[in-house]
């Protein structure tokens, strides 16, 4: 059983107890507690449990490190120079509360600290090196950040479906794939297969996001239209149309379920529940 | 002998050859080639040589990782929301050339990528874990970023000398200490002693910076006065006066030299040359 309180303790505990610069700790904590659904760390922990591992503090700490990088990227994404968002999940964004300078530094902290947290997790050194190599490649110039730059560069441009897939595989896919890869590294199980499942789930996640951006508009007339449309963002819906996007989402989620069910010595029940929540 | 071309290759090679997103690679390369003096990586390599190690690609790659984090922090420091600098070392700052969004993302990349580079350096796993733990603690919420937040919070305030020391130990000191610690980890030598020398050198470095900010003004009348004074920044000169700051610098540099000369199985010649260049 995932203990959600333990997860929250790992996510905020470092900033509460070990970071002595009050202003920095406050700002980071604010964003860490701003209503994130913890999908990445929960996926990671659920996969470990599926392999029969008993969850320990070290696992919760690696889970927290994933959420830190994700949260850091949201803080920077929301900056005026980037997406310029005042609200996220109904709460003021970090820079609206703490100012831009501290928002930049809080994101920086959330990118630099996870490596300390994983390096001191107590796992065997070879395992730590593998986790860190994968996390850095998933988040930096070979992953998430590269995707964000491609996304920025392609705004308002017409690009083919393959390009869109590549963009999202980097931008959101890699950090959604990492929980699968990391769980495989720690459980000592089929990493390549887990990576493939993670990539497919990442894709499904993005298609779902694109659909929701449009359907929220369709369903509640009078609401501001989807931000993606306003910004002429390339989405699965704009490229495939709503119906085909829905089919693509369903196809990918099915593929994830088949993949999970084919893993050896793995009880997929809990992970399948998370996947099913992504169905529309 | 440190091969400076090899160092440059390690610093820019990853972005030239492995980062496929052109716009991101260009922006990061621009800042990496913007005239940095490479003091941190050169210190690291010189200490390794002092211990008699033959420098290999892995050493140059760790050296590059240090420069990456340093450069990332400069890009973010220069942002309009932070120090708002248009020029650094006579060249336009990153955001003036590539825009703020890409400057934020380029700094992010330079914070996230070093861990991949070190994790894939080929050193034994235990050594890599120690290097990464120290680098992350030197750069994130336990080091550089914490110092930047304290610095920001204390602008225009009167604080005691101890506070100023603490601030700089975090803000600039930790990333100047890391080359000493990292060399000790790799050479398997007196890490604690090296850390102490690094802390003292970091302090000397900051005092020197503060003196130069004022003397550049004293010596060339008609020039814009030092930026620190304009911004009412707390400096060693404002706290101690110019003469005492000079003495403090000299005292710290002497301490560094004594420390270096006391290391076992260590030829301090090259490192001493670097330290002497810091004398005013």
Image (spheres, coloured by chain):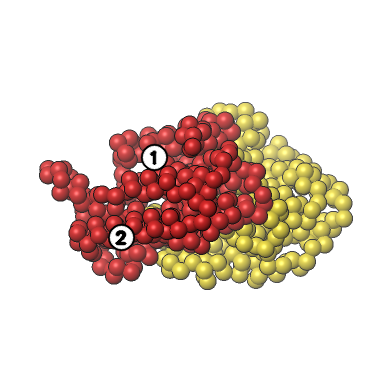
Chain colours: A yellow, B red
Does any portion of residue A185 appear in the rendered image? yes
From this view, report whether residue A179 is shown above or below residue A33. Answer: above
Horizontally, residue A100 falls left or right of residue A71, namely left
From this view, report whether residue B50 is shown above or below residue B150. Answer: above
Horizontally, residue B82 falls left or right of residue B265, namely left
**Residue lying at the far left of the rendered structure:** B221
Q: Do the residues labelled 2 and 1 touch (CB within 8 Å)?
A: no
Residue A173 position within the rendered picture, expressed as x and y whole percent measured from the top left: 65, 44
From this view, report whether residue A187 is shown above or below residue A262. Answer: below
Name which residue lies at 33% across and 35% down.
Answer: B91
Nearer to the camera, A30 or B147: B147
Secondary structure, mark 2, is helix
Ranked by sequence position, the earlier of labels 2 and 1 is 1
Give the image quarter of residue A58. Answer: bottom right
Residue B251's disc number:
2
Name which residue lies at 81% across and 51% down.
Answer: A189
Nearer to the camera, A220 or B27: B27
Name which residue lies at 51% across and 62% down.
Answer: B192
**Pointer 2: residues within 10 angstroms few (<14), some, or many (20+)?**
few
Residue B36's disc number:
1
> Which one is in front in this view, the residue at disc 2 or the one at disc 1?
2
Residue B161 position within the rendered picture, expressed as x and y whole percent measured from the top left: 29, 68
Does any portion of residue A144 appear in the rendered image? no
Point out the image quarter for the N terminus of chain A: bottom right
From this view, report whether residue B34 is shown above or below residue A9. Answer: above
Secondary structure, mark 1, is loop
Residue B68 position within the rendered picture, expressed as x and y whole percent measured from the top left: 48, 43
Horizontally, residue B187 falls left or right of residue B150, namely right
Name which residue lies at 52% across and 69% down.
Answer: A18
Residue B10 position within the rendered picture, expressed as x and y whole percent measured from the top left: 53, 36
The Cα–Cα distance between marks 2 and 1, rounded to whole angstroms, is 26 Å
- Tell which subunit mark 1 falls on: B
């Amino acid at each position: 059983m995932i203990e959600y309180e333990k997860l929250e303790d790992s996510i905020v505990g470092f900033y509460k107890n070990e970071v002595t610069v009050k202003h920095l700790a406050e700002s980071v904590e604010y964003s860490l507690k701003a209503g994130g659904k913890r999908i990445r760390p929960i996926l990671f922990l659920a996969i470990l449990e599926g392999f029969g591992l008993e969850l320990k503090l070290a696992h919760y700490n690696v889970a927290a490190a994933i959420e830190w990088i994700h949260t850091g990227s949201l803080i920077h994404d929301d900056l005026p120079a980037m997406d310029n968002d005042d609200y996220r999940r109904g709460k003021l964004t970090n820079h609206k509360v703490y100012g831009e300078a501290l928002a930049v530094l809080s994101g920086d902290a959330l990118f630099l600290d996870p490596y300390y947290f994983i390096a001191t997790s107590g796992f065997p050194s070879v395992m730590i090196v593998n986790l860190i190599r994968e996390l850095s490649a998933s988040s930096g110039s070979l992953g998430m950040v590269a995707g964000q730059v491609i996304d920025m560069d392609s705004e308002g441009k017409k690009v083919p479906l393959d390009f869109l897939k590549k963009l999202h595989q980097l931008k959101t896919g890699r950090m959604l794939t990492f929980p699968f890869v990391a769980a495989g590294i720690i459980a000592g199980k089929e990493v390549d297969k887990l990576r493939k499942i993670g990539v497919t789930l990442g894709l499904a996640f993005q298609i779902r996001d694109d659909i929701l951006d449009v359907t929220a508009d369709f369903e509640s007339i009078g609401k501001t239209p989807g931000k993606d449309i306003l910004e002429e963002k390339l989405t699965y819906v704009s490229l495939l149309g709503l119906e085909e996007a829905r089919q693509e989402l369903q196809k990918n989620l099915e593929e994830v379920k088949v993949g999970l069910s084919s893993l050896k010595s793995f009880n997929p029940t809990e992970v399948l529940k998370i996947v099913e929540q992504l169905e529309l």
